[in-house]
Amino acid sequence: MNLQVVDPHKFDDWNLLAANVAYICWAAGLLIILGYFIRLSTNGDNKDKYDFINKFEISVLWIATIIIIVGAGFFFNSNIPADIKTIIIFVRIFLTIMMGLITAVIIQNLLKFYYPFYIEKRLKVLRYKPRISPKTGKPMKLLSEEEEDVYLDEGMQAEENVFSVDYDVWKDEETGFIKIEKYSGHLHAIQCPECNYQTFKVVKEEVIRPATETSEGELLKHYQCGYCLYKAKKTVILKIPTKINEPIA
Ligand SMILES: [Zn+2]
């Protein structure tokens, strides 16, 4: 006969605490995500939204994921029976940590390699959606690379020529109102030609030959894939800077 008496409420305090920690974690994770999207939707214009998504979306989702997984770990251990063997407790802790890590790695990979495709689509829409002129309330026109130079000062042109920076110039053709937006190639990944993930980024740039007033220059961009580590170089021609006060007819 087994005379050992088990207190049936031995783990009640723990179980209650674990369940509460789980709910708090889940609430916090969801609030972070909700807060992000509310903040995004109230963010001024398309360009602000573009920068906000580019800068924060993946990190915010990742932080929320970790908090929600920690909550799940507590939740799965909030029903410890009173007669559990000590060894089983250790097995449960071990399994919880392993499952948590595996889930985290899977979600991290989804965020890093698949999610950017979805972000990219939204960023493209935000970047090329016609800007509305504050003067006339009508859509403005996005100028071509050739047309835009007249509106970029020499500093901006130099920047476009030395870094992976793109300026978009929007023009209200009725009033001549101009809106200039800056996009950085360092912050923004393109599709990798090797593995096709949206993880190909400029990692280094070298000016081989600077553009002068009379001759075009050359810029070498070094790309590397964040997923398969594929590397590539691309030469870009540096245009002869356009003088602001002498617009091309
Ligand atoms: Zn790749």
Image: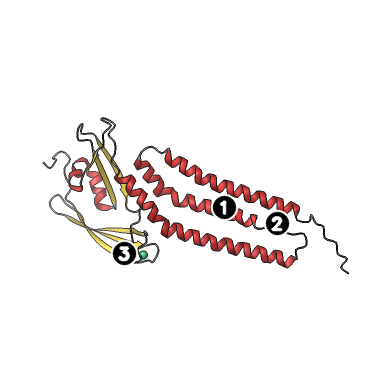
* Quadrant in which residue 6 is drawn: bottom right
Q: Considering the numbered disc 1 on the image, is that residue within a helix, a strand or a loop?
A: helix
Q: CA distance from mark 1 to mark 2?
A: 18 Å
Residue mark closest to the camera, 1 vs 2: 2
Is 204 or 81 nearer to us in this picture? Answer: 81
Q: Is residue 240 above or below residue 112?
A: above
Q: Mark 1 = which residue? A: 68
Q: Do tag 1 and tag 2 residues touch (Cβ < 8 Å)?
A: no
Q: Which kind of residue does numbered mark 3 sit on?
A: Pro
Secondary structure state at the residue bearing disc 3: loop
Ligand 1 within 8 A of label 3's CB?
A: yes
> Taking the image as four quarters, which one is ligand 1 found in?
bottom left
Say whether residue 212 is left or right of residue 224: left
Question: Which residue in the structure is indicated by mark 3?
Answer: 193
Residue 174 lies in quadrant: top left
User: How far across and how far down the image is residue 44, in percent?
Assistant: 38, 37
